[in-house]
Amino acid sequence: MRILPFAAAAALFASSFANASAQGAEPGSLPEQTKPPMHGPAPVRPAVAPLNRADPNSPAQAGRNALYKYLDDIADKDTADRRAAIAKITTRDAAVTRQQEVRAKILELIGGGFEKTPLNAKVLGSTQLDGYRIEKILYESQPKFYVTALLYLPDGKTTKLPAIVMAPGHASSGKAGDFAMASTFARNGFAVLSYDPIGQGERLQYPDPKNAAAMSAGDPYPGASLASRATGEHGEAGLQPTLIGDAVARYFAWDGMRAVDYLVSRPEIDANAIGAFGCSGGGAMTALLGAADKRVKATATACYFTSFDTLLPSIGAQDAEQSTPNFIASGLDFPDLIEVAAPRAYAMVGTVSDMFPWAGFLKTATEVRRFYSLFDATAEGTATGKPLPATPTGPTLNPDTANEILATAPFQVIAGIGGHGNLRPITSQIVGFFLVNLAGKKAEDFKAGPAPVAGASPFAAPNVPAGTLQVTATGQVATRYPGSATVFSLNLERAKGKIPVPVKPLTLQQVQTEVRMVTRAEAVPSAPSPMSTPNAPEDPDHIRHRLKITTEAGIALDAEFYRPTSEGKHPTLLILRESLDPAMEAQRAGDIEHLRSMAKAGTAVFVFAPRPSPPGGEETKSPILGPFYMTELRAELVGKTILGMRVDDVIRAVDFFSTGYTEDPNNITAVASGHMGLVLLHAAVLDPRLKHVTVDHVLESYASLLKAPMPLDAPQDILPGVLLKYDIPDLVRVLGGRVTASDWLAGTANLAGR
C-alpha cells in the first residue's frame, strides 16, 4: 500500500521533466551477485496518518522524546559555546570579523551563490484600486524558474518610491494572503513587491493532476498539492538538494534577491530605499534576504525569531528552508541572521503568545541589541534606571530593554499580544518603522486603511475584482508554462557539475572514511559493551529475553535475545526491526515462535530496534514525507543524521552480544529490510564483525533518488552531501561476498516498503 498513488504524480511530471530526469551522475553498477533481475514489489506498510500530531505524553512516544532530548543536549552545548564566543566580541572590528565569518559560513552551508541570468520580467495586467494599483508581474529568478508577484504602486507619486519586498507565511494562497498588509503599505506611499515563494500560490512544485481542470478554468486557488500544503512542498523540495550538499534555503534566498533586482529595474523605485518584510514562513524568507542582500536597507521579520535553545524543546525544528544542515553545529543561531545586517535598520516583530517561544525572542533581541551597539550606540539607547519592562499587554516598542530607544535607532523591537501572526494590532508600528527608515518620515505619519470586515480573516481581500491577485491565466505556473523549471529540475542540472566522476573505485578504507564523514556515525567496533536491563519477565523456558539496551547516554533501545538451549558457542543472527513495541505481541505471535525455533535449533538470535525505540511519531507536514522528516531536520541542524545514529546503535549492539557466553563472535550475520537495510549496509562497511548481511527492499542508489520526481518516505535515508562522496553501490561493492541483496527499490518507489 502506497501513501498515495505515485503513478499519478509520475505522469504529471513526465512531460516536464523528461529531459531533466536523464541528467545527473549515473550510479555505479551493482555487482552481479547482488543485482536482482528486476525490482520486486514492496511489502505492505500502513500509511502515515495525514497531518497528525504525536501525543508527547504517550508511552509510544518515549523513544522519540529520548532522541529529541539527545539532540537538544548537543544543540545546547553548541549554542552555549556560541554565546560565550559572542560575549567576547566587544569592538566594532571584532563584530565586523564575526559578520564576515558568519556570512561566509551561511553561504557555504546553503551551497554557494547563483549566477545572475536575465529576469525576462513581464507585466501581465493591472488593476486600479482606491489609492493604488496592482500590477501582475512574472520574472525568472533562474532560467524558466518563474516567480509570480504583485507590484503595488501608490497613486500620484512624482518622486521615486521607497519599496518593500514582501514574502507571505506558509499558506497555499501565497502572495494573495498578503493583500491586507501590502495594500496598507501602498496607502502609506510604499511600492510593494509581494511574491509567491516556492511551493505556494501559483508556484506549486507538486500540483495535484486532479486539479488540472480547475487550473484551466482559471480558478485562482486550485492549489491542491500532492505534498498536502506549503510546508509539505518545502520539505519535499528540500530533500534532493541535500544529497548534493546544498540546502533548499539557497533557492528561497535567491528568489528574494531577484525580487530586489526587479525593483531596482523599475524607474519608479528608489534603489537606495528598499526594505523587506515577512511574517512566519515569510519571516524566515525575509531573514534570509536581509542577511544575504546588502541592498536591503531596512528589514522587519515577524513571528519567526526566537532562539534554538528555546525552540527545539518546545515545537522542535521547523521546515526545510529554516533548518539548514549543520547550522547549529557550525556555531550559528537565530541572532546571526540579524547581526550580519548591522548597522542596516532592523526590526524584530513578535507576539507574546506565539508558538515561537517569547523567551527565546527576548534572548535574541538582547544579544542583537548589544551587537548593534558596537556599530551605533543609539541601538543600546539611553539608560533610564528603570527595571526591565513587564511582559507586554498591548502594542509595545523595545520590551527587551529598560533603556530609552530613539525611533531612529537602527535596531527596534516591536511586540504585540496574541498568537502567531496576530499583526493587525501592531500594523502601525511595523509600517512606522519603514516610514522612518525608508521614507524619511515619522512613525506618526502612518495612515490606516479601511476598517476590517467584522469576522473576516486578516488575510482576506474584500472588494477586489476577481483575478486581481492572480498572475497566470491558469492559476499555476506548472500548467501555464509547460516545461518550466522546478527545484527538482534545477537541482538535477546542478548535480551534473557537483557530483564528481570517479577516476577509479573507492577502496574499503576510503569508503569507511567517507561513510563516517557523511553519516556522522561515531561508534567504534569492540568498544565497551553497552548496558542492558530486563524489560519483561523471561519465558518459562528461558529462551526469549526482552531487554533495554543503552547504546549511549539517554538512548535505550528495545531488544529481544533468543538464547539456544544447548551448551557452547553458537552462530548469532542480528535482526533489525523498526519497532518491538510490546503492543504488537499478539500480531507477532508467529514471528516470535519462529525466532524461538531458531534458538532451539542452535542459532542465537538478537532482535533490536535502533533509535528511536519505540519509534513514536511527529507532526506530519505531508504523508509523502513519512514519519521522520522533522526529526531528520533536527538531527541535521546539530550535525547528526538518523541513519548515522542508527549505525552507531548497530555497532554497539554487536558490542553487546559479541562478548556473551553463548554467542560465537566469529560467526555473526545480520538481516534487515527497507530503511533498516540501508542502515545495515552502512554498519557492515564499518564493522568487520558482521560476517554477512542480507538486505531487501533497500534504496538502490542515491543517484536514483536524485532523479525521482517526488520521493516517498525518504527523509530517514537522507544524508547531506552523500553524492559528493559515495553512493549505495559503493557500499555493496566493497562488501563483496559479505552481502546478499534482493528487491532493490528505485528512487521512484515508495521507500516505506519493508
Image (cartoon, grey):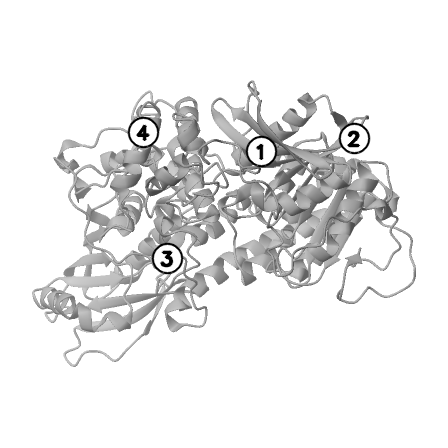
**Snapshot quadrant of residue 351:** bottom right
* 513 to the left or right of 120: left
| Label 4 Cα neighbours within 10 Å, binned few <14 / some 14-19 / many ≥20 | some
Distance between the alpha carbons at the discs numbered 1 and 2: 22 Å
Indicate the position of residue 660 as horizontal and vertical percent values: 24, 65
Indicate the position of residue 591 as horizontal and vertical percent values: 15, 65
Q: Secondary structure at mark 3?
A: loop
Residue depicted at 21% across the width and 53% down the height: 670
Distance between the alpha carbons at the discs numbered 3 and 2: 50 Å
Q: Earlier in the sequence, mark 1 or mark 4?
A: 1
Residue 467 shows which numbered tag? Answer: none
Q: Which residue is mark 1?
A: 149
Q: Nearer the viewer, mark 4 or mark 2?
A: 2
Q: Is residue 91 visible?
A: no
Q: Give amino acid for label 1.
A: Ala
Q: Residue furthest left?
A: 601
* 178 to the left or right of 218: right
Q: Give amino acid for label 3.
A: Pro
Q: Earlier in the sequence, mark 4 or mark 2?
A: 2
